[in-house]
Image (spheres, rainbow, N blue to C red):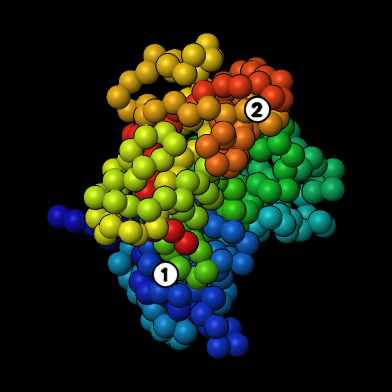
Amino acid sequence: MATNPRLEARNLIRRYQGRAVVNDVSLSVEAGYVTCLLGPSGCGKSTTLRCISGVDTPDSGQILIDGVMVCDGGRGDAPENRSVGLMFQDFALFPHMTVAANIGFGLKAGRDENSKRVAELLDRVALSHLADRYPHALSGGEQQRVALARAIAPRPKIMLMDEPFSGLDNRLRDGIRDETLALLKEEGTAVLLVTHEPEEAMRMADTIALMRDGHIVQQGAPYNVYNTPIDRDAAAFFSDINILQIKVQGALTDTIFGQFLAPGYADGTEVEIVIRPQHLKIDFDRSGRGPNPTPQDGTPARGVVERARYLGSESLVEFRMDHDGSILKATVPSVFLPKPGMVLWLMMRRDRCFVFPAE
């Protein structure tokens, strides 16, 4: 027998001054799973989160928790009746309360049971030794863990998180994110997390909902959203891209890298072939034959190095192509810093290209 998702939003619309900031948004999150609402600033992510929490009210649409309607159009349960936890960029800890008192603030059971729950959470976030400290005496990472413990103390069914890690420095961020997710999954909490960072979404999410201009334009597992983007902007949101603008003839496109299939497009249609820099292959022996060429590699094309930069885990090399003077970018693992003016040959992986209508 099928069970209801822990959280389900159906066709949410929220208007401000006549403009639909959230426009027909639908999504669901299962218990113990993480869905990331990913998109640029101003696309409606945080407004969606506020509608689900009950802090804001949608103009239309429905919100269900475990199959029970908590919001239908402009009518809905109060936030405190939705079994929803909230975590934001600002940890909003009470400065006059100790760590233990902050964590226990929302608990409504008896004193002994509340104390037991606080002690359990202090142990799980490794802060038992700081129970009597005040927030001002804590590091940013410690404050983050207190905020997490306080949010999950009442055992909410759903955790809504709005850019909760953006205030942490890079050195701490990965560890705190992983600890947070592990704890939420242990609790069986359904997590809806807002972020504008693709890397964070790829690292954390079971499902990514890519949002743009109030709409969810694509939803799926991180692998699928990354490798089968719905359009050029979706591809570009996750990484740099190279674009070749070509006309279709006989379901094929003629490019400097040979012919590529463009099924479904009529003759004369302007299309864009999009490829990520890591999928351009460089012929290091400069022969034009390519490094271990395969049928998917296409025809080598000659380019001149414009500049090269080492980025830590990889090198980014920019080429000016002989054919039309366009600039293409390729990335190479580790250190590869050819001098400007060096001639190399590039190949474009046919199986790694995306073909979209020209914008």
Taking the view exactly as shown, the residue that stands out farthest to the front is 323
Tell me the distance, in whole angstroms, between the alpha carbons under discs 2 and 1: 45 Å
Circle 1 sits on which residue?
Answer: 25
Q: Quadrant of residue 254?
A: top left
Taking the view exactly as shown, the residue that stands out farthest to the right is 137
Question: Which residue is drawn at the image coordinates 65% and 17% (left, top)?
Answer: 335
Mark number displayed over residue 305:
2
- Percent across and percent down for residue 327 are 60, 40
Q: Is residue 338 left or right of residue 12?
A: right
Question: Which residue is drawn at the image coordinates 55% and 88% (left, top)?
Answer: 18
* Amino acid found under the numbered disc labelled 1: Val
Q: Nearer the viewer, residue 82 or 2?
A: 2
Label 1 Cα crowd, 10 Å radius (few <14 / some 14-19 / many 20+): many
- Percent across and percent down for residue 101 are 71, 52
Q: Earlier in the sequence, mark 2 or mark 1?
A: 1
Taking the view exactly as shown, the residue that stands out farthest to the left is 1
Q: Nearer the viewer, residue 178 or 80?
A: 178
Label 2 Cα crowd, 10 Å radius (few <14 / some 14-19 / many 20+): many
Question: Which residue is drawn at the image coordinates 53% and 27% (left, top)?
Answer: 302
Q: Nearer the viewer, residue 74 or 60?
A: 60
User: From what the image shows, is residue 200 above or below residue 52?
Assistant: above
Q: Secondary structure at mark 2?
A: strand
Q: Nearer the viewer, residue 19 or 27?
A: 19
* Amino acid found under the numbered disc labelled 2: Val
Q: Is residue 313 visible?
A: no
Q: Secondary structure at mark 1?
A: strand
